[in-house]
């Protein structure tokens, strides 16, 4: 793998591919940045993508591309969107701080002693800066976890893990203050110039602020955990109530009627509207009331002048007194005549003299209607006869 030979070369490479890197950083959670899409963003110049891969900016995972962890963590730290809180950095700075203090006390050359002293100042500043960032990341991750994590079990586990991180940060703050105040008294007495005094004062102030912020974060984490437990109990209770409701056992196994009858929440009450009438004196003397009246009068006038949505006129022919006679067959009359005939139903219907001309098909319909409507009063035999292409049973009156 190639390496950048200068900061200028690194900055130019990042500037040239800033659109691609911006999209990859925005989609770092999805793990689905396709190679074809990256090729499109680099004007289909594959050598530009190969350049970033060779220099360790991105890596190829087959059909997809990912940003290397080194640059990904750099962007997340600078933009303050990282979710991982690494407290080991502070411990490393404490170790390096002790080492450089020891080197300073053993060194006799003034120039090299100054370099060690400068390294001590840098370690102290890094301890304070890293601690402040860890506290900020802890607060942001705590809020994001509680507000955005849908699974309550995972949400609770993440908050517990953040609580452990909080304890580690608090412990490192205590170690840092202990080192400055008690563990290295000789160095801070010998090397305490004006600049060192300002650095130590700023570091102590930042560590103290961070510790107080941790107390508030710890209180908030405990509050969130209690809320999760409370919401979980409500969820379990609602699930049990739903089961009882589905089994029609809700009123039998609970006191829901008694509880509901004792509660009278305000939102269940009907809303009452009160009309307030203005006094005559106010309407006569107030300019504001006069302008309001003029505005209302204009609205009423415009409402009267506006066209109304009227339906079309009813056609004149629609209202004419027209009647239509429907010549229907009285089946009851036909049935009464059949009861007095003594022959079977099919033969009677086919030979019956109706008041109007009736087709053979209509007579078949009347036969079926009579057989179904008066079935309880008819005697259906097991004998069948044929008439044309129609086979019919012999049905007699009881």
Image (spheres, rainbow, N blue to C red):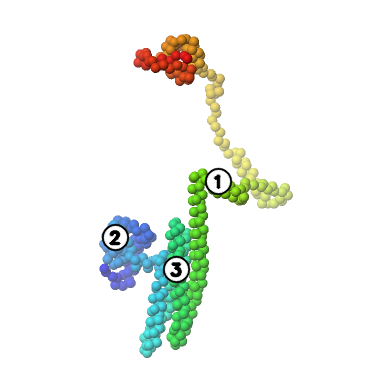
- The CA distance from mark 3 to mark 2 is 34 Å
Dot in front, 1 or 2 = 1
Q: How many marks?
A: 3
Name the residue tied to disc 1: 251
Question: Considering only order in the chain, which callout, 2 or 3, is on the residue closer to the N terminus?
Answer: 2
Name the residue tied to disc 3: 164
Q: SS class of the residue under badge 3? A: helix
**Residue 61 position within the rendered picture, expressed as x and y whole percent measured from the top left:** 29, 60
Q: Residue at x 55, y 49 (%)?
A: 254
325 horizontally vs 272: left or right:
left
**Residue 326 position within the rendered picture, expressed as x and y whole percent measured from the top left:** 50, 17
Name the residue tied to disc 2: 61
Q: Is residue 355 above or below residue 252?
A: above
Question: Considering only order in the chain, which callout, 2 or 1, is on the residue closer to the N terminus?
Answer: 2
As drawn, the label of residue 53 is: none
386 horizontally vs 366: left or right:
left
**Residue 249 position within the rendered picture, expressed as x and y whole percent measured from the top left:** 52, 45
The quarter holding residue 86 reads bottom left
Q: Residue at x 41, y 78 (%)?
A: 94
């Amino acid at each position: 793998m190639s390496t950048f030979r200068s900061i200028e070369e690194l900055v130019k490479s990042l500037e040239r591919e800033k659109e691609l890197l911006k999209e990859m950083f925005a989609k770092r959670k999805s793990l689905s940045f396709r190679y074809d899409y990256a090729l499109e963003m680099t004007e289909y110049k594959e050598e530009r993508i190969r350049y970033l891969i060779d220099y360790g900016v991105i890596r190829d995972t087959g059909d997809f591309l990912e940003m290397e962890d080194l640059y990904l963590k750099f962007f997340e730290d600078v933009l303050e969107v990282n979710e991982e809180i690494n407290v080991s950095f502070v411990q490393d700075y404490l170790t390096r701080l002790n080492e450089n203090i020891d080197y300073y006390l053993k060194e006799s050359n003034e120039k090299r002693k100054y370099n060690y002293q400068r390294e001590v100042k840098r370690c102290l500043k890094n301890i304070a800066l890293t601690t402040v960032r860890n506290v900020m990341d802890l607060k942001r991750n705590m809020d994001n976890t509680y507000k955005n994590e849908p699974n309550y079990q995972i949400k609770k586990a993440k908050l517990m893990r953040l609580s452990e991180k909080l304890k580690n940060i608090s412990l490192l703050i205590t170690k840092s203050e202990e080192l400055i105040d008690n563990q290295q008294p000789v160095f801070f007495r010998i090397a305490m110039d004006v600049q060192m005094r300002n650095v130590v004062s700023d570091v102590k102030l930042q560590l103290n602020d961070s510790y107080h912020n941790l107390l508030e974060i710890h209180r908030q984490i405990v509050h969130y955990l209690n809320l999760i437990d409370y919401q979980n109990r409500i969820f379990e209770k609602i699930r049990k109530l739903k089961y009882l409701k589905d089994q029609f056992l809700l009123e039998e196994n609970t006191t829901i009627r008694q509880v509901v009858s004792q509660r009278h929440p305000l939102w269940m009450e009907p809303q009452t509207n009160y009309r307030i009438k203005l006094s005559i004196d106010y309407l006569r003397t107030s300019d504001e009331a006069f302008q309001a009246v003029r505005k209302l009068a204009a609205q009423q006038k415009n409402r009267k002048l506006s066209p109304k949505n009227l339906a079309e006129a009813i056609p004149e022919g629609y209202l004419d007194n027209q009647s239509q006679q429907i010549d229907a067959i009285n089946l009851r009359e036909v049935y009464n005549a059949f009861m007095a005939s003594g022959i079977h139903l099919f033969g009677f219907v086919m030979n019956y003299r109706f008041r109007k001309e009736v087709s053979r098909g209509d007579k078949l319909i009347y036969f079926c209607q009579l057989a179904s409507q008066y079935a309880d009063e008819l005697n259906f035999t097991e004998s069948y006869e044929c008439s044309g292409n129609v086979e019919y049973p012999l049905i007699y009156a009881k």
